[in-house]
Image (cartoon, rainbow, N blue to C red):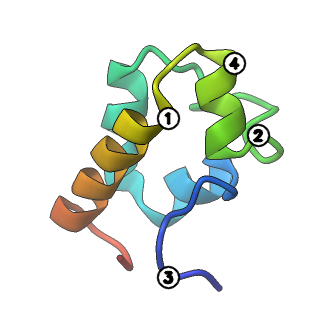
Amino acid sequence: MKSKVTEDMSMDEIMRRWPATIPVILRHRMLCVGCPIAPFHTMADACREHDIDGSAFRDAIRRAIGAGDGPA
């Protein structure tokens, strides 16, 4: 299992492994929480679909993981 968040991980995996990322996802107005596509959309896919800067989003997710619960 991966120990760091990467752009090729599904949004579902990210939210399950690191619940502290959910507020970040919601702040970016992404609808991944509860979405049936979340297990199939990678972070890169979701950023592209929602027209979000992937680098800035990844950094925000990593900060949330560093400050939250779960493996880093």
Label 3: few (<14), some (14–19) or many (≥20) C-alpha neighbours in 10 Å: few
Callout 2–callout 4 Cβ contact below 8 Å: yes
Q: Position of residue 6 (x, y in %)?
A: 56, 62
**3D distance between C-alphas at marks 2 and 1:** 14 Å
Label 2: few (<14), some (14–19) or many (≥20) C-alpha neighbours in 10 Å: many
User: Does label 1 or label 4 sit earlier along the sequence?
Assistant: 4
**3D distance between C-alphas at marks 1 and 4:** 11 Å
Q: Is residue 3 above or below residue 17?
A: below
User: Does label 3 or label 2 sit earlier along the sequence?
Assistant: 3
* Numbered label attached to residue 49: 4
Quarter of the rendering occupied by the C terminus: bottom left
Q: Position of residue 47 (x, y in %)?
A: 59, 28
Disc 1 designates what residue?
A: 54
* Numbered label attached to residue 3: 3
Q: Is residue 50 left or right of residue 23?
A: right
User: Does label 3 or label 4 sit earlier along the sequence?
Assistant: 3
In front: label 2 or label 4 = 4
Quadrant in the picture for residue 38? top right
Q: Is residue 36 above or below residue 50?
A: below
Q: Is residue 15 left or right of residue 68?
A: right
